[in-house]
Amino acid sequence: MASRTTQTVVHFSSAFRLPGFEAPQPAGDYRVDHDEESIEGILRLAWRRVGAFIHLPAIALQSSAQQMVQLSPAVDAALEKDLG
């Protein structure tokens, strides 16, 4: 089974909260990775989302410490709806 990661940049115009973080994240642009695995069919190849990760801090903020946080399915679905 093949897998791939696609990257998007999402923009938050105001501060937002992520589960597991006490402080809100600042407004700005954030890189989001979407991990997908292939679904092989007879006629065509399709991809199924298996996870999404947001990179912290925001792209414009200079920080020596960065982390990648897995997004919950609800947050991932909201981002996908916003991007679509």
Image: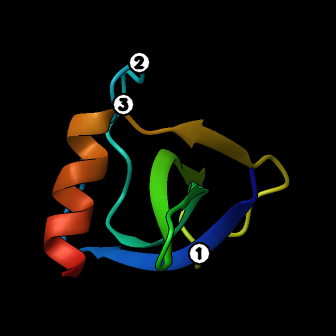
Which numbered disc covers residue 66? none
User: Residue at point 14% right, 67% down?
Assistant: 81
For marks 1 and 2, the one nearer the N-term is 1
As drawn, 3 above or below 29: above
Q: Position of residue 6 (x, y in %)?
A: 60, 73
Dot 1 alpha-carbon crowd within 10 angstroms: few under 14, some 14 to 19, many 20 or more: few
**Residue farthest to the front?**
42
| Residue 73 in sight in this render | yes
Mark 2 sits on what residue?
Answer: 20
Dot 2 alpha-carbon crowd within 10 angstroms: few under 14, some 14 to 19, many 20 or more: few
Judged from the image, the secondary structure of the residue bearing numbered disc 3 is: loop
Query: Which quarter of the picture shows residue 21?
Result: top left
Disc 1/disc 2 C-alpha distance (Å): 23 Å
User: Residue at point 80% right, 46% down?
Assistant: 65
Between 55 and 70, the one nearer to me in the picture? 70
Task: Name which residue type carries label 2.
Answer: Gly
Comparing marks 1 and 2, which lies closer to the viewer? 1
For marks 3 and 1, the one nearer the N-term is 1
Which numbered disc covers residue 23? 3
Disc 2/disc 3 C-alpha distance (Å): 9 Å
Query: Which quarter of the picture shows residue 74?
Result: top left
Comparing marks 2 and 3, which lies closer to the viewer? 2
| Residue 61 in sight in this render | no
User: Residue at point 85% right, 54% down?
Assistant: 64
As drawn, 44 above or below 33: below
Q: Position of residue 34 (x, y in %)?
A: 53, 60
Between 42 and 50, the one nearer to me in the picture? 42
